[in-house]
Amino acid sequence: MTIRKVWAVARKELRQASRDPLTLTMLLGVPTMMLLLYGYAINFDVRHVRLAVQDLDKSARSRNLVASFVNSTYFDQVADLPAGADVERITERRQALGVLVIPEGYASDVEAGRTASLQLLLDGADANTATTVIGYAEALVNAENASLAEENSGGRAQLAGIDYQPRVWYNPELKSTQFLVPGLIGFILMLTGVLSTALALVREKERGTIEQLRVTSLRPGELILGKTLPYLAISLTATFIILVAARVLFGLAVRGPYFDLFLATVVYLVGALAFGLFVSSIAESQAMAFQIGIFASMLPAMFLSGFIFPIRSMPLAVQVLTYIVPARYFNVILRGVILKGAGLAAYPRDMAFLLLYASVFLGVSYARLTRKEG
């Protein structure tokens, strides 16, 4: 082995790589993009939590308490609920992550030196966020108690302070598995759905068997359908296995309608498989299809879908980017159906996006593959 021979091979490889702009983009552009994107997206801080307020006291003290929550920047007040409002519906439809309930007589209890009650109702479907929010609320209530103690330093009767009572719905024990397993379903299905169809058609190109299929009586639509239906069935079977395993191993039961869960999963999978077909139409090798599939499906489904990191804690530009990630909407539906017992009627926007995503990539993939076939 000589340096001259090694250099000759290396120079040849560099020349070939320079002639393939897609490879250069994957090798140079993707790491840079990942560093910038996920360096900003990965943030464990929770800010601007959507908070509904049910102030039954309507006093200056209660308004000051609400203002302390909002001014902390941890909470954004999104609704002012009247007495008798369906607070569970607010959290079920994700209009708010929490509901702050201030009972009637709050101010009079504080003034009389009695213990004043305060309740925070939280959506525990995202256990990590709920735990963090409980900590924020406790800190704010402690600050309010300290303010009351300072106010009382003039020699009045001892104030009992505020009794803060957090109550977590849907996942009262705040088990991380209850939050992670639904997200894992969306992550796994997106990854396997995209890669299965992407690699299947590119494999035909590499082996040259795609040319044999072209001379048969198969229409492009029939070929696409025949290639995708088996993977749709396999992915649905994988979903069933995951749900059974989650039930047996983690005690995670599906509380909502099974049909709604099945329908949402089918639409989501059709979108993933269609995107895989699109990848196969632009990739010329299995290696390239794999790289594109991983970058375009796995990474967004993990980091930009709300699966692990709260979307509202990301920079605004990254938040905008998450709107084109189908796993974001599927995770909302999964957690709603599995943890909250809700149906698809509670999530029309999320279902509409999944339908739009599947329709667009089915149309684009069919157009590209038909043009290639013709």
Image: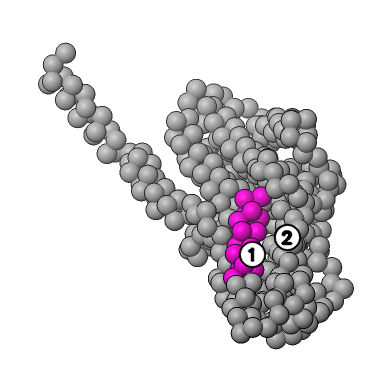
Residue 352 in sight in this render: no
Q: Which residue is mark 1?
A: 137
Q: Dots 1 and 2: beta carbons under 8 Å?
A: yes
Mark 2: secondary structure? strand
Q: Label 2 amino acid?
A: Pro
Q: Is residue 333 above or below residue 13?
A: below
Give the side of residue 291 with respect to residue 271, left or right: left
Residue visible at 33% across and 44% down in the picture: 28
Q: Which mark is residue 166?
A: 2
Residue visible at 62% across and 67% down in the picture: 142
Q: How many marks?
A: 2
Q: Label 1 amino acid?
A: Ala
Residue visible at 16% across and 13% down in the picture: 1
Q: Which range of residues does the magenta coloring cover?
A: 127-143
Residue that sits furthest to the right in the current view:
84
Magenta residue check for 133: yes
x, y percentage for residue 284? 45, 34
Q: Nearer the viewer, residue 312 or 7?
A: 312
